[in-house]
Amino acid sequence: MGPDLQADLPKTRRLGPRPAQTRWLVPQRWDGWLTDHLRPLLRDDPDLIATTTQQTADPRDLQALRDLFDRHAPRETLSRPHCRLADIISRIADPHREPGNLTDTRRALDALLTPWVPQPRIRATLIHRLLRRAFLAPLRTCLYGFVHTAPQLHAAGVESARVIADALGAYSAWRAAPYGPLGRLFFAFSERHDPHRRRDTQLSVAAFGGDPHTDVLTLGHTTAVAHTGHRRIVLGLSATAYMPLAHRHHVHEHPTWWLPDTAEGAVSIHAETIPGLGDDREAIRISGLTGKARIEATRTMAERLWPRLCTELDVLARAPGSDVQDRVLVVTTSYDSCRHLAEGMYQAGAPTGSVCVAIRPTTQRRSIDRALPWPEIPGDRLEDFAYMREARILIAPLGRAERGLNILVPGHTRSAIGSIWLVVRPMALIDEPAELLAHIQAAALDDAVPHSEPWKELRRRRLRAGTYFEEIVGGGRYFRALPDRAKKAIAAEMVISLIQLVGRARRGGTPGRVNLVDAAFLDPDGKAGLPRLIRALRDDWRANGQLETLRDLYGTTLDAFFAFADRH
């Protein structure tokens, strides 16, 4: 297939509605970004216009921002533009004022902010987020009050109070730590809006609570005693349950028994960046891009990667035991990205049927109905890839690839995957409530110690959780603006994902090799490069006396990550 293939490919058109994509909104999550762009106005200093730090906000500026939404905040010491902005916002945020017209409020904000935020696109985003916060923060406060008074309302005969409280979160069942170290539920909102169906516009709210970290720690004693009257031994079988700083996976307890990984040379990690098309031949980076730029970069990456994959398949075919690990797994971060990679590979000349593409399990298979050049496989049946005769490359999203069933050679117990190519650097969005809560709860347990007066330890955790929440929301969305602990936590989770991913190629004792393709993995000019983050993790583990335990647990696998970090 030649360079005109793109014209021959079916146009991207979905059969049926696109699966719902819910993005949760935390009212305070943008405070750092808002503070950064409103700093000139808040300080009444025109010299600061057009300068943003993209770092953690100054506490005084952050408080000045929050005073905008607080009708009780003193206004005597504020500058004129600060007072004017607070007055406009109060039309939305103050429940005791006559509600203002939203269109007029937007116009007033735009007129006031134009001299202070001259870039139209940034100013429009700023106004949008100010109004969102003005609406949602008071609503969240109201919900807090409702949930706390729901038991009294229910006792007074208001049956609907309990129904509504339970709808926000199923917290009626007994839990050792129902609200987590924050000591309260965590409310987040989601929006659904279709400009063609305005009557279907929805604002939804959900309460996030619980404390999985503590639930796991107390499973064998507090929870077991509460349910059965006896303590129980907890036997865990996860290979990545102990990794300090990993906020979603680390169990904050030293393991009693484990089976170490001592196979020499069983894991190798390599950087396989792809040069771009420009004169500078700069390596292609996908992570951090959005929209059309990300799609085009993904297709270009696949097109340039295809010759390397062909070479890789030839090497695997000539290797001893070539009837076993003769296939390649290409991993990205979403199902849409899988399709974009396939388009790029076929644009580069991939033979029909040679590449298999994972699709959402609920999606109708288009390759049957529309004669696509690639076969498709549901994401929950990736193990069936081994039974395909022509396809030797599977493109799948990371979430499915790292946790799915093993892809084994038919009739064998050994992996069919010879090498793994991770094309896009995974970076979990800290905006998501579950992700944000995991960071907060894990940080609160960092220095947990048994205490003769448990309420003092609970108070310490609550204070630490609250402080850490402010540190996170006080920064921008940029990785470099996150607290150091959050950066290391994200790196630890990335290492866990790679360990799970390389496990797809190690079933039956076969070696596993991961190639990192996205130039963002190295990021030599920034602070988000994986080698730098792994070295920071190693230093932290060594300083806290945890490194030797980790070496005992992960053995040569962890050494492979350290070797990769030291090479780069």
Image (cartoon, rainbow, N blue to C red):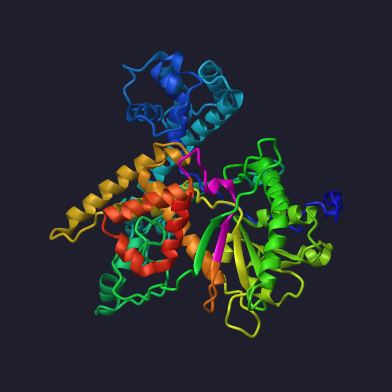
- The image quadrant of residue 381 is bottom right
Residue 424 percent location from the top left of the image: 59, 52
Q: Residue at x 46, y 47 (%)?
A: 430
Residue shown at the point (39%, 31%) measured from the top left: 57
For this rendering, which residue is in front, 149 or 490?
A: 490
**Residue 363 location (% of width, % of height):** 70, 63
- Residue 454 figure quarter: bottom left
Q: Does residue 108 appear anywhere in the picture?
A: yes
Tally of numbered discs = 0
> Looking at the picture, does residue 436 appear above or below residue 407?
above
In the rendered image, which quarter contains the N terminus? bottom right
On the picture, is 249 further left or further right than 444?
right
Q: Residue furthest bottom?
A: 411
Residue 516 drawn above or below residue 195:
below
- Viewer-proximal residue among 277 and 568: 568
Q: Which residues are magenta?
A: 513-528
Q: Residue at x 37, y 44 (%)?
A: 484
* Relative depth, front residue between 437 and 91: 437
Q: Within the magenta stretch, is there residue 517?
A: yes
Q: Is residue 328 magenta?
A: no
Give the side of residue 292 with respect to residue 547, left or right: right
Residue 110, image x, y percentages: 56, 21
Q: Residue 539, image x and y in percent?
A: 33, 51
Q: Is residue 192 left or right of residue 134?
A: right
Q: Residue furthest left?
A: 452
Above or below — where is 438 with respect to 390?
above
Residue 393 in view of the camera: no
